[in-house]
Amino acid sequence: MNELSCRRVDALAHATALGSHSDLSSSVARHLATCPQDHAETRELLAAVSVLAGAVLPVEPGPQLRSRLMATIAHTPQGATIQGQRGDAGVPPARRARPGWRDWLRPGLTRGITATAAAAVVVLAVVAFQLQSQLAARDATLQAVARTLSRGEQVLSVMGSAGSGYLVRSSDDRATLLLAGLDAPPPGHLYEMWLIDADGAVLPAGTFVPGDTDVSVVDVAGGVANAATFAVTLEQHRVDQPTSDPVLVADLAQ
Amino acid sequence: MMPTGHAHVSSSTAAHARARDVAFERLLVTRIQNGDRDALGELYDRYSSLAMGVAMRIVRDHDVAEDVVHDAFVAAWRRIETFDVQRGSVRSWLLTIVRNRGIDRVRGRRSTIEIGEADEQALLRTEADPTLAAAIERMGNDELRSAVEELPAEQREAIELAYFGGHTYRDIAALTGVATGTANGRLRLALGKLRASLRGSEAEPAGTGSSNMIASDE
């Protein structure tokens, strides 16, 4: 229901955005959510107010605040648990020593990857040679990877705490993950692949468990044309969203 | 044939860095929504200094500001399911909670775990222009501060009294000794200028190049 007219909403937008008409915030929001008019200027004014908070000078909190917050959180249930996704309500997951998403995605890693890129080309040639020498005993997927390598398709470095490898992107925007010496997952776990687009949407791209051979070759499910980042996490079972930090990451942006 | 080509390597672009940042943030929110307390700690690591900056600006006392930030993160933890990652920035949402809690504290209102007003304001965020909101997310703290500092003094004063002081335009008129219409006009003009400034930043050229691509040519 639109209690406010379009003209009134446009006239109030700046004041409600700034909180100086907070009593009308919900009415304005409801109007904008349902009104067939685009209210373009009003929507831009609503966005512009975010500048104010983002422009403040950062101030470091005291070192004890984080532990105080985490202690509070340990005893604070969430207002509404997402049904079916949380089997251990109230039990914090064990703190992991390995780096988090941010660490893997930071520019420093990218610099590290680029610094090793030239060396990776040489390694790639060796891997390709080894693969080709084993083709007779490999399955069709492996042959496809070797053919891709031979054609000089785009090959991206995949790196992380679980090891390193390559992601081979074919001309039809399919991709194959090629790993050598990947650690076996802990009992009851598997690796799950993810494609993350430029807007941050995360799509599952298949699961795998390394076989007995040194080389693992896995087809990535789904096209990679719109993906900006490829990642692999360790999961207890196939999930729709990652529940742990990535153990392998590749930057698909170019 | 063996891949014998050379590597094409260049630095990651700002756009790609932002894409990774967005991806990280969305994954973080998903983890918090799934009850992952470590993820909330990571959110704290990411935004606590900015949250403290907002709180300090409002309450002007370090200890009180820490209380405000603590309560805001607890509120975010409790109400994270109300945040729609598809429609807004968790930074804006979180800082709105901090701002509203800070103003509640200054006004002596009881600080509760509920975040009704912050929800209202966050609801407005989701109706904001997504392109402009994305431009703000791309901008660094220095750029955003410059945009505010470029406003005429009387407009900047009005907008800061509204946002950080929680004053209505009538309050602002009384505090600054101008007519209510003038105060209201200054708020609108100030936000309009910020909007124009942001629209300019939308034209920022994206870089080119690849980060970790190894291309082998025959």
Image: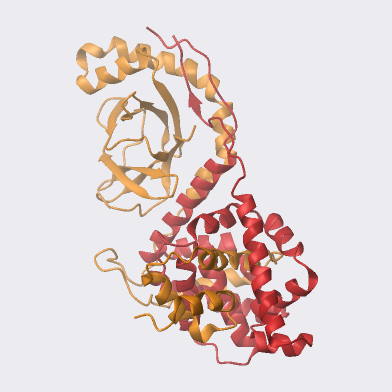
Q: Quadrant of residue A131?
A: top left
Q: Quadrant of residue A224?
A: top left
- Locate residue A241, reporting x and y percent: 33, 53
Q: Is residue A87 left or right of residue A246?
A: left
Which color was chain B given?
red
Q: Quadrant of residue A151?
A: top left
Q: Is residue B77 left or right of residue A13?
A: left
Which color was chain A given?
orange
Q: Nearer the viewer, residue A30 or A196?
A: A30
Q: Nearer the viewer, residue B4 or A53?
A: A53
Q: In which quadrant will I find the N terminus of chain A?
A: bottom left
- Locate residue A33, reporting x and y percent: 39, 70
Q: Residue furthest front?
A: A7
- Locate residue B38, reporting x and y percent: 46, 62
- Locate residue B159, reporting x and y percent: 68, 75
Say if A170 sits above or below A58 in the image: above
Say if A123 sits above or below A233 in the image: above
